[in-house]
Amino acid sequence: MKPFSQRLSRTLLVLPLALLLALSACDLTTVGETEQIANIETIRAGTPSPTATPTATPTPSPTATATPTVGPTATPSPTPLPPTPTPNPALLGFGFCDQRVGPLDGRFSARLLAADASGAPAFEQVTLRFELAPGSAPLGAMADCAPVTDLDAQVAADLEGAYALRVRLPGWLRDEAFRSSPITATLTFSGTRLLTGARLLPAADPDAGVDLLIGLPEPLPFRLTVERNPTRLTLAVARSSPIVAASDQLRAPTSGGPPDLDGPAFIIFDGDIWRVEAGQRDAGPGLAPVAAGATNLTASPDTETALAVSPDGARVAFCRSAPGLDPADAELPVPGVLWIMNADGSGARPLAQVGVGCADPAFSPDGARVAFAVDETGVTPIQRTLYAVPLEGGRPQRLIDGNDEWSRFAPQWLEGGAVIFAAEAQDGRSTLFLRNPRGEISDVGASALVNDTGEAIYRALGRPLAAPDGSRFAVEALRNDGLGADLLVFDAGGGILEVIGAAREVLPTPTPTPSPTPTTAATGEPAATGAPTGGAAEGSPTARATAAAPTAAAAATPAAGTATPPAATGSPTAPAAATGSPTAPAAAASPTAASAATGSPTARATAAAPTAAAAATGSPTAPANVTASPAATATPTASATVTATGMPTASATPEQGGTPTATPAPSPTLEPEPPAEPRREGPYWTRPLAWDAQGRLIYLTTLCASQVVQEYQVYRWAGARRSEMILTGSSLGGIGAAAMEGQRLLYVLTDTAPPGARGPQARRPRGPASLWAWDIAGGQRGELLRAERGIRALNIAP
């Protein structure tokens, strides 16, 4: 047996090691430090990411990106796409896209009880609290952001900032409930730096509709959500914008500057035709050369309205109207004549004078003839037909026999001498007609407007754009529901090769509806002194009642079948979900407690009577459902507490023996959950830009409807189900006309865009504009020319 001293020394050696192991397994952080760390992490999550450049995945080498259509991708993109910003979890669901919540096709009756503003690290928000009339339809609203210049001048003058957030409630009846709202037309908010005020304006409809307008210094991402039971409409606005100069890739020059052009480009500016050439340093009044200059080729008092360049680039055909008149800006017929001149402006002469007006000249692929649209009668509404004339002169040939209800325009030549053109009727119908080389005409648009079951999927077709060799053509197809456009690609015979950008509607999963059946509060066991025990609140996920004298505690359980509220997004101080009254602890200082929390994230009740009943009346039996939102919007601060009186949901009556029995009271009728709104998947608008020399189509896709930001992607189509994305970006301006010279894309950008959702081409751009060139194969991109006013047309020899 070992000596006692040896055993003692070993024991003393082992004890410190055991103590060190035990301490290493423990978390020595105090509760206060833990809460402080949690708060810091919450604030970090709510702070916007410093990465400012939007979209696309970072990659050291270019990669092909999937097209909206299904199929294999083509060769890798030559243009590296910008890196993807780090997502901020506090800004989930925020964006520039137009948003809507609830049904918009019905009308509802409601009082607006209050409008509150609050702030969080990443965003600020305004919450409108409504009281719907019994039996009213549910509230529906939509929101968008737009420049104040798009608004009525008087309304814009009353707003602070260059942009306005608009919340539209088109179905809000201006009835007695509306008139009894304790809210003024002008709202002022305190405690927020971004959202300082708002205006309530009646809509044009004399019976219904109200708009809420909030001025902003710049376009900012926003999110619109609605809560039921009670009804709350919340507009949250991000404190900072992800849009920076580099976001608009079409407007971002490369280090090498714009590519060299093989020949001149031609534009219409201030009613004259200008020749734009790289390297030239001169330009006329209103034009500023950057990497190219411009020469006025016409310089006449007449107005040039449309132009076309021959395939060899040697001739320019154009329509000339009387001085000061522009057919695009006039509702009345405008006299016009088809002219021809050399590419340097020499040899200008009339080529054909038929009827009253001239529009839409187009060269045949061999350059021998020019097709154009003619207003033969000069009466209103204008009805055009088509003619073709040999380039060297001669009698114009009418391409259409007889007259009917169709007005024909925008001719484009196809292979073999065929012509595709657009047509519109006075009743709003629209189609495409194909005239084959034998002169036979077929309606190729009719089959494109309907699906296989005969359902109308498109309400109109745009202007066709033919490939240089005439083998294919593309056209915008405006969706029948009015929400955007698809791109249709046809072969020369009028058969559809592909539908690009088609969107589909998806019905969301219905939100579980709270059960209206009241539940009975739990009854606690009496304390040792025999004092009564309080019950827990109903309609709250977590509720506790604590009595100091006598002592009682009972935890409530939510009603069976009720929905669990989603967690609040981006709230630094309210960890509970933003639904009715998510957490309502009630502290009772005496045996009786009765409280109701309405519209408050955290409600506390102090009791003073022998029986306890704590009720969160914001939701009688379950948390309020949040609809049409990726996450519920929590009130960022819990400083405001609204207490409702006279709304008890249960009362406790002492029985013989001292134990109270909870008696449920009738619950108020819940607002019915509206039917699930369909959700659209797919891009908003897809339109053609230009065809390259290899017969590949460059097209532009706008991802969503927005009044202020155009989030776009540029693709190259090389055949059915073979598209590749070559550029992506976000623009506050407009994207105008485009033309192709070999692999170089020339395009017009406007500093501002016409009112309305971004997507269609701005045919009459307002404000300053610029001409850009982009070598798609080599990646060079840069600005050629700036114009004080809009550039009307753009054309170049392919």
Image: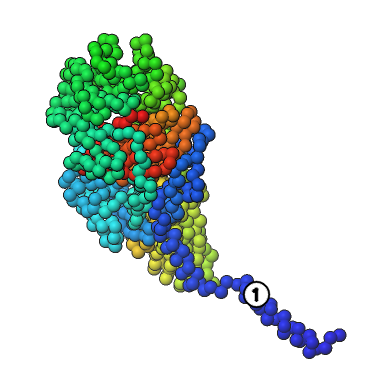
* Viewer-closest of 633 and 248: 248
Q: Is residue 769 left or right of residue 233?
A: left
Quarter residue 384 falls in: top left
Q: Which residue is mark 1?
A: 22
- Residue 353 at x, y = what percent? 19, 17
Quick check: 507 above or below 237? above
Q: How many marks?
A: 1
Quarter residue 260 falls in: top left
* Viewer-closest of 62 and 315: 315
* Position of the C terminus by quadrant: top left
Q: Can residue 395 be seen?
A: yes
Q: Which residue is pictured at 43% across the width and 52% down the height? A: 85
Tell me the element at label 1.
helix
Q: Which residue is pictured at 36% across the width and 33% down the height? A: 740
Quick check: 248 above or below 610? above
* Viewer-closest of 68 and 258: 258
- Residue 647 at x, y = what percent? 36, 56
Q: Which residue is pictured at 27% across the width and 18% down the height? A: 391
Q: Is residue 154 left or right of residue 18?
A: left
Amino acid bearing label 1 = Ala
- Residue 708 at x, y = what percent? 30, 44
Quick check: 72 above or below 27? above
* Position of the N terminus by quadrant: bottom right
Check disc 1: other Cα within 10 Å, few if <14, some if 14-19, many if 20+: few
